[in-house]
Amino acid sequence: NAGVTQTPKFQVLKTGQSMTLQCAQDMNHEYMSWYRQDPGMGLRLIHYSVGAGITDQGEVPNGYNVSRSTTEDFPLRLLSAAPSQTSVYFCASSYLGTGVGEQYFGPGTRLTVT
Amino acid sequence: GESVGLHLPTLSVQEGDNSIINCAYSNSASDYFIWYKQESGKGPQFIIDIRSNMDKRQGQRVTVLLNKTVKHLSLQIAATQPGDSAVYFCAEGEYGNKLVFGAGTILRVKS
């Protein structure tokens, strides 16, 4: 299994540009999520999904969109990039079961918005 | 790797000693608690979890203690090794709901 994969690893955007961060998992996990991690802070949940066709907002959803058309893929779209979105973005997946504690994380995408 | 954790609390321990990393949580309704380890330049990695109806759980070289009275969680690492150097995060969650992560603690192991 490849686990959770994310592309690209690094990205530089200009303010106002849009882009999509890709995330895929091959473990047939129902739950997928996107987090951002800023220096000196923990992970903050952006959006999550409990299955294909179902998405919901996390703590910091503004400026981001997601969709879940398949179990495997969960792309994150930045609509109009802002410097405040400079961060490291992690995608994670897990079985639902009785909780979503044991999440498997991808390697991250480091995004810089100038 | 990325410079996460610039202002995080740091615990420095000698190789071979035991480490104790502490975490205060906020939601008394949380059903489970988890510890993650994040090495420089990598995504977080699950270490161990504990359900709210337990007060102790042991894994390989790690023990998690839960004190619901004071909303406190700790991770004990026995015989700390250089490979244990990382940022450690606690997280809490309710069944059917999302996880909330703490800010993290840096563990530095001195050889």
Image: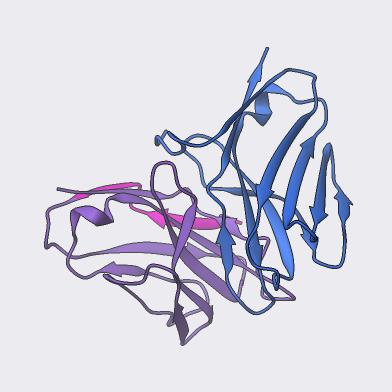
- Residue A98: name its quadrant: bottom right
Left or right, B104 with respect to A15, comes to right
Point out residue B96 in the picture as x, y percentages from the top left corner: 65, 79
Above or below residue B14? Residue B63 is below
Point out residue A105 in the picture as x, y percentages from the top left corner: 54, 55
Above or below residue B111? Residue B94 is below
Q: Nearer the viewer, residue B33 or A107?
A: B33
- Residue B16: name its quadrant: top right
Coloration of the structure image: by chain
Q: Residue at x 69, y 77 (%)?
A: B95
Q: Residue furthest front?
A: B70
Left or right, A13 with respect to A110, comes to left
Q: Is residue A6 magenta?
A: yes
Q: Nearer the viewer, residue A36 or A32?
A: A36
The quarter in which the N terminus of chain A is drawn is bottom right
Q: Residue furthest bottom?
A: A53
Point out residue B108 in the picture as x, y percentages from the top left corner: 61, 24
Above or below residue B48? Residue B81 is above
The colour with which the image depicts chain A is purple
The chain coloured blue in the image: B
Q: Residue at x 43, y 39 (%)?
A: B4
Q: Nearer the viewer, residue B51 or B10?
A: B10
Above or below residue B6? Residue A29 is below
Point out residue A104 in the picture as x, y percentages from the top left corner: 60, 57
Q: Is residue B8 magenta?
A: no
Q: Which residues are magenta?
A: A1-12
